[in-house]
Amino acid sequence: MSTPSESAPYGFVFPGQGSQEIGMGKDLSERFPAARAVFDEADDALGFALSALCFAGDADELALTANTQPAILTCSIAALAAARSELGDAFVDGAALCFGHSLGELSALVAAGALAFADAVRLVRLRGEAMQAAVPAGVGAMAAILRLDPERLEALCAEVSAEIPGEVVSPANENGGGQIVVAGHAGAVERLSERAAAAGGRAIPLKVSAPFHCALMKPAAERLDAALAELTIRPLRIPVITNVDAEPNLDHERVRALLVRQVTERVRWEASVRKAVHMGVQRVYEVGHGRVLAGLNKRIDRNLTTTPLGSPRDIDVLKDGAQ
């Protein structure tokens, strides 16, 4: 059996919400027993057939945050298990680091050995429920802001947040390529979008169920903190670049606080990718369903290669040694 040949450090990256669709993971599960075992473990841990929802369920039900989060994590870990079974331990264990976008950081922590998969899938189910419940429908909003200087956008967010007591908006995702997503109260996001457009940027409202990664998520952060207190967080096998700091973490005692902060703070994806490149990583494998991160990464640094690792075909290509 051949495995991908890597002379330079490589890493694994894991997607967050937005990559889900009906049929995700089905081919992996049918082809690789190791992947099927991950879906079976998720079904047992959650007490319902997450696998059936992923493979042939209702799209609206899958789009519910409480379902989306465990579905994406399970597909990522199933793909990693399939890669281990087909490409060998040396390939999976040879990664220099890993990181994930928002929810994907939990997948990265499973890959790094800090969280047991069953614990993680139950945790992200609770995380999704808590994030959905934190803000009543219609109260919050998110928008993607394009072509606006980050410092100018930061100033506009502060300006808008100071106008009406109790209404806030702030950067939520620094995705790179001139795209920053903002989140907060619906009215504040609308005013921010208008001013961003007037300043030469472009605002695109996002269809989301809640305003993620902002101060409105504090109740969800508190619930996640309590849940993490009940879990065993083990030493990390490799560093995980964290969303909130964009720095590699190897200290398992910091994981809980970093995950709690992540719920209310921005996802620093662009800085995380640049940190990986600075650490010598030239290739990352996007582990799980979809190609969202490949698109983001290309806009950040064209010298970083993002290789898909989420389907039987992806694994076959790597197995054949074709990069």
Image (cartoon, grey):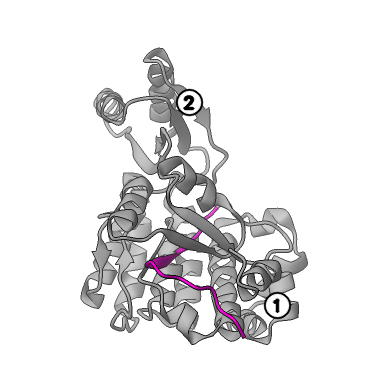
| Amino acid under disc 1 | Ser
Residue shown at 38% from the left, 76% from the top? 112
Nearer to me, 298 or 61: 298
Count of numbered circles in the view? 2
Q: Where does residue 85 sit, x and y in percent of width and height?
A: 59, 85
Give the mark toward the camera: 1 or 2.
1
Quarter of the picture holding the C terminus: bottom right
Mark 1 and mark 2: Cα distance apart in space? 39 Å
Nearer to me, 219 or 244: 244
Asked if the stretch drawn in magenta spans residue 316, the answer is no
Asked if the stretch drawn in magenta spans residue 15, the answer is yes
Nearer to me, 37 or 317: 317
Q: Which residues are magenta?
A: 1-17
| Amino acid under disc 2 | Ala
Quarter of the picture holding the N terminus: bottom right
Residue holding disc 2: 203
Q: Where does residue 120 sit, x and y in percent of width and height?
A: 45, 75
Q: Is residue 157 above or below residue 211?
A: above
Residue holding disc 1: 29
Nearer to me, 234 or 139: 234
Q: Is residue 200 above or below residue 104?
A: above
Q: Where does residue 79 sit, x and y in percent of width and height?
A: 59, 73
Residue shown at 38% from the left, 58% from the top? 220
Residue 40 appears in which quarter of the rendering? bottom right
